[in-house]
Amino acid sequence: DCVSDTSSTENLITILKAMDTTQNSKATDFLGDIKDAKNEGGTRVNGLVRDAETAELVDPWGNYYDVHLDLDLNGKIDNPNTEEVSSSTTELHKTAIVFSWGKDRDKAVWKDNVGSWGIAQ
């Protein structure tokens, strides 16, 4: 599996928005229209942050999203929710998941994290 995030350092959003045609040779914008991030108290929140060469995506609290991809194509991804992991939930039957660390900005505290697979509360 591949673990990445939506920071400009990782370059994932830049590629998906067709701003890097070396990695996205057909220049396909896979993300379409995403609203621009707002500036709240000097922090960019809730949207796309870009300049001429890079792009990144931030959640409503200014965090990058974590992105996990199933690169071996077995249809499974390790469950990052350490509070949910048990003998039956160590893997998620997904090919890609995205999650935010939530308002507390703490990846380890899952009660406020927001995930694309329905995080258990």
Image (cartoon, rainbow, N blue to C red):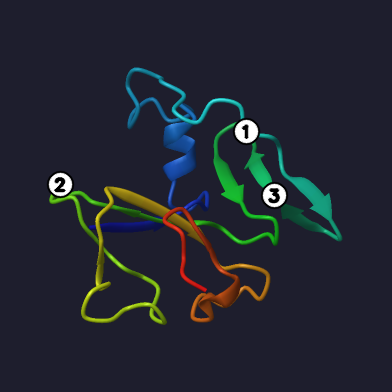
| 5 sits left or right of 51 in the view | left
Residue 33 at x, y percent in the picture: 61, 26
Q: Amino acid at mark 3?
A: Asn
> On residue 73, which mark appears?
2
Q: Residue at x 38, y 77 (%)?
A: 84
- Residue 23, by quadrant, is top left
| 30 sits left or right of 7 in the view | left
- Residue 18, by quadrant, is top left
55 lies above or below 106: above
Q: Amino acid at mark 1?
A: Ile
Name the residue beneath numbered marker 3. Answer: 46
121 lies above or below 70: below
| 77 sits left or right of 15 in the view | left
Which label's residue is closer to the chain start, 2 or 3? 3
Name the residue beneath numbered marker 1. Answer: 34
The residue carrying pointer 3 sits among few (fewer than 14), some (14 to 19) or many (20 or more) residues within 10 Å by Cα, namely: many
Q: Is residue 72 or residue 7 the one in the foreground?
A: 72
Q: Residue at x 21, y 80 (%)?
A: 87
> On residue 5, which mark appears?
none
Q: Quick one: quadrant of the N terminus? A: bottom left
Which label's residue is closer to the chain start, 3 or 1? 1
What secondary structure is marked by label 2?
Answer: loop
The residue carrying pointer 2 sits among few (fewer than 14), some (14 to 19) or many (20 or more) residues within 10 Å by Cα, namely: few
Marks 2 and 3 sit apart, C-alpha to C-alpha, by: 31 Å
